[in-house]
Every structure is written in C-alpha cells, then in structure tokens.
Image (cartoon, grey):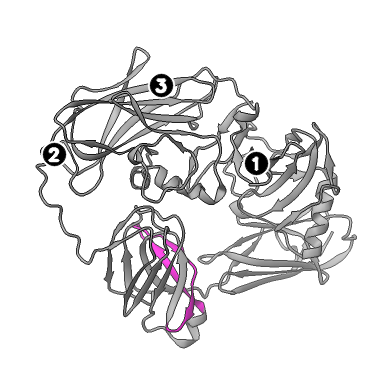
Amino acid sequence: MELVGNFGEIRPNHFHSGFDFRTNGKEGLPIYAVADGYISRIKISAGGYGKALYINHPNGYTSVYAHLQRYNTAIAEFAKAIEYTKESFEIDTTLSEKTILVKKGDLIGFSGNTGSSEAPHLHFEIRDTKTEMPINPYLLGYTIPDNVKPTITQLAVYPIGEKATINSKHEVKKIKTVYSNSKYSINKQDTIIANGDIGFGIECNDSETGSTNQNAVFSIELQADGKRIYYYEMEKFSFENSRYVNTHMDYKEKQKNNFKIQKCFLSKNNKIEIYKDVVNFGVVNFNDNSLHLIKFIVTDFTGNSSDISLKVKSTSKCNLKALPIIDNAILFDCSKDNEYKKDDIEIFIPAYALFDDLLFNHSETPIIKGTYSLLHRIQNKETALQKPYSLSIKPINMPIYLQNKAVVISINNIGKKNYEGGSFKNGYVTTQTKIFGNFVVSIDTTAPSLKPNFKFTAKNYADFSKTKKIEIGAKDNLSGIKKYSATIDGNWVLCEYEIKKDLLFYTFDNTIKSGKHVFNLEVKDDKDNTSTLNFIFDN
C-alpha cells in the first residue's frame, strides 16, 4: 500500500484526518471492512467525502471509507431507498446496530473520486466512536514500510511583539537549509542576532519507502540550549478544532508563497490538542548578550528523524526605530467580542474568532462598475480567522426590486469574484464570512445554465435507447447550485450531482419501462434564480 496523504497533513483550513491510499489513478477497486461491526452511517454529498460509509466496531472505534464510486449492492439499494423517500441525492443517515451487519473482509464498496476528491483514491479514517475524534491509523497497526527520514526545507525566525528584532530588523527571517553528508545545516552567512521575544518555525515533510509523495511528519520538537520548549505529536485531534491549522502554520506565508512553515510557538488563541511540553508558548527571550543553541528534531511515525541546529547571538540592545503607525487601526482583543461600525458598514467579530490580538484596519474606495456599494478593504487575506464574523454593508443606489437578489462578494487581488452569501435586511446586506479582504455588494439575477450532453434528434426529443444515462451540464456563475429536482412522467427520480464536472446525471434502472417519457429538470441557485429543462425521450 502507498499513501498519497497521511494523518495530520496541512490542508486548506484543516488538518487531514486519515490516510489517503493510492489507487493508481483507477476507480472501482474493491473496498473491504477492516473489522467486524455494523454500518452506522451512510452519507452522500456532492462535495466533501462524496459517497462515504461509517462502520462502528465493538472495540469502540469507527472506520470511515470516503470518496467511494459506489457501495455494494445491498448498501446501494438501501441508500437509494432513502434518497427516494427524501427525494434528495444528498443524504446523511444513521443506522442502528441491527440494520446492516458486516464481518471483517466483507466487500462494502468500490474506490472512486466522488465529492471534493482531486483524483481517484480511498480516504480512510479511524475515529473514536464516542467522541468522533479522528485517530492516527498508525497507532492502531496500519503501518506503511518507511525507512525514509523527514526532509527539512527551510527555517523561519519571528519577532514577537513590537520591540523584538532579528538582525536589527522587525521582520521575519527565512533560512534555506543545506543537506550534506546526511545532515541538515544552514549557511554560515545566515547568522541570527536577536533581541526580545522570538519564535521559530520549520518547513518539513516526510515520505515512505518507494514513494515520492510529500506527507506530514509525526512530531516536531524545539529545544533551546538543550531544553525542550515546544513539542507536538500527531496522534488525534477534534474536527471542531481542525481549523486551528491556520494558526499552527504561518498562514501569511502560505497565502503569499504557498510555503507550509509550521510555527513552533503558539498564538494566544490556539486550542488544538496536539501540543505537549510547551514552555512560555514556545517563545524564547533573548537579552543576555550570550550565544544560544536552537535545535529542531523532526520525526516520522516509524522513528526516522532529522534535526538541524541554529546558533542565535542574543543582544540586550534594541536599535529598532519606532514602528510606523497604521492609519485607522484599532486594537482588537481576540478573547473578547469586537465591533466596528460606520455609516456604511458594520462588523461584529465574536470572541476567539481571531487567533491573536489584532490591529484592525478598514478603508474604503469608490464604487466599482456593476456593484452597489463602496469597496471595503477589511484587514487583508493574509490574516486568518478561526470562525465566522458578521459583515453588514449598506448598498448604494440599489433598486428596491433587486434587494432580494443582493449578495456580498469578495474580490481578490487579480479581480476574481467569490460569493460570500448575504441577504438584505434593515438597510444592509448581511452575511457571515471566515475571511478578510475586499468586499462589495453585488446582485445575482442570473439563473444556472443547463447544457444537455446529448443531441436532440428532433425538437425537444431525444433517443436514449442505446445509452444508460441522461447527462446534463449544470453551472452557476456566482452563488452556486443550491437545489435541483428531476422527474420522469411527473415522478421524482434520482439525479446525481458531480460537482467537479458541473454535471447532473440520471442512470436508467428497471423502474423506467421502454417507450416514450417526459423528463423535467429544475435547478435553483442560492438566490433562487431558476432554470428548467423539459423534453421527451425514448428508451
């Protein structure tokens, strides 16, 4: 077996919660139950895990199998019956321990690429059944051959607080590593002279025997003068805390340069459960005019390790000039609720939505053509959030008849627009969002586009006698497809949604007899703009 992703990897807005097993670009490989138990949950969604199965086991663990192409016949029929009862492709159903029993080695489904999967693979998890916390499968005997040491690509040194300096500057210093004679080091010219509170970070990854994939390490330790001041192990974490990945890493560096530098010091609001033996939040104070040794030790689960040391010359002198004052900046305490109000904008950030105290900044620029408000620059995209905040923007010159189509959109630095939701109420368009950046009020009046992936042989007539599926491209330009429903001869039928391909498809079964039938499809976006497609077909 080969992993394309392991437990604890840094992913967008979350830690990876299991193993991703390579299927060599193929779908349809048989998937078997890892132990006796019962199917406890069947979940089908257009995004996320796609088609997934959950098995509860007598030992208190739950195994999870995600992105499946399909289930075995019995489970597929059970799931389909639920979909028809609820008239919904997406379902999330819990089952009793007597409904579908399985034995170790039973065929439960086939590997696929459904949901938010970027390529065919099996996502596999082990969870604590009671707490639902994902557990590193390595800890339960799922080992992969591994004689490869972790790699260390770069280090980072951070000034903490306004008065800290690194080489007389209040700037983060990044240092590329050198690998020679099976050891990691830094170039001699990369000297560090530090004053004040300093944090350290490391970019590293791991692989397994015969693999070229760059996966996560199991643990990182930071020592200062031989004493451990920071340590973590990737054993388990809770899903509700998984978004703390955005403060575990250097989020700004990830946004700017796509580097995954793991900070070996903690922010004020960091509640992820992986840390141990952290002294003074992992921050080191330098002010004694002495030479200090900083050492990183990086280890994978099988015990392969790499280390690198960094000498830091401490100085009691701070030659730093006063930092520039940011116009209109307000200090927000991350442990408290924070509000910001002006005539045309209201912001409410709840306690612990921020990872650290923040010098909050907001500015405005004139209306962009085609929008209905000033452009509001709120902080920047390089500042991460743990949970959403409320954003209300007052529209300008918006006709009353468009108020129910009003939305908030964000606009990135290259002009790409992204839907942030929102509804008009009390003179503002209000939404909840987890990002900072540039925001305006816009409207969504365009219905989803529907494009049949077949040719009509006559007006509104198609012949499906030689095919097993009806496929229709479905795409929305802004708010996204929220709801759809398909009928044949007035009866609801199961139409699946492959979100990566913007594709809706119905697969013929024995309930549709040969002959002429009427197909109807209705698709709505998040602002209730609706498109329909109707035609007659033979099968």
The location of residue 243, given as percent across then percent down, is 48, 50
Residue identified by numbered label 1: 127
Q: Which amino acid does label 1 sit on?
A: Arg
Q: Looking at the picture, does residue 533 appear above or below residue 308? A: below
Front residue of 201/268: it is: 268
Q: Residue at x 65, y 29 (%)?
A: 140
Q: Earlier in the sequence, mark 2 or mark 3?
A: 2
Labels 3 & 1 near each other (Cβ < 8 A): no
Q: Which dot marks residue 168?
A: 2
Residue 463 in view in this figure: no
Identity of the amino acid at label 2? Ser
User: Secondary structure under badge 3?
Assistant: strand
Give, as a single range, the part of the protein colored magenta.
405-427
Please indicate whether residue 96 sits to the left or right of residue 229 in the image: right
**In the image, residue 464 lies at what x, y percent?**
80, 57
Element at badge 1?
strand
Q: What residue type is labelled 3?
A: Ser
Is residue 425 within the magenta segment? yes
Instruction: Give the CA distance from mark 1 to mark 2.
Output: 48 Å
State the CA–CA distance, disc 3 to disc 1: 30 Å
Q: Is residue 299 above or below residue 460?
A: above
Q: How many neighbours does mark 2 have within 10 angstroms: few (below 14), some (14-19), or many (20 or more)?
A: some
Taking the magenta stretch, the answer to whether it contains residue 313 is no
Give percent across and percent down for residue 358.
Answer: 30, 57
What residue is pinned by disc 3?
A: 306
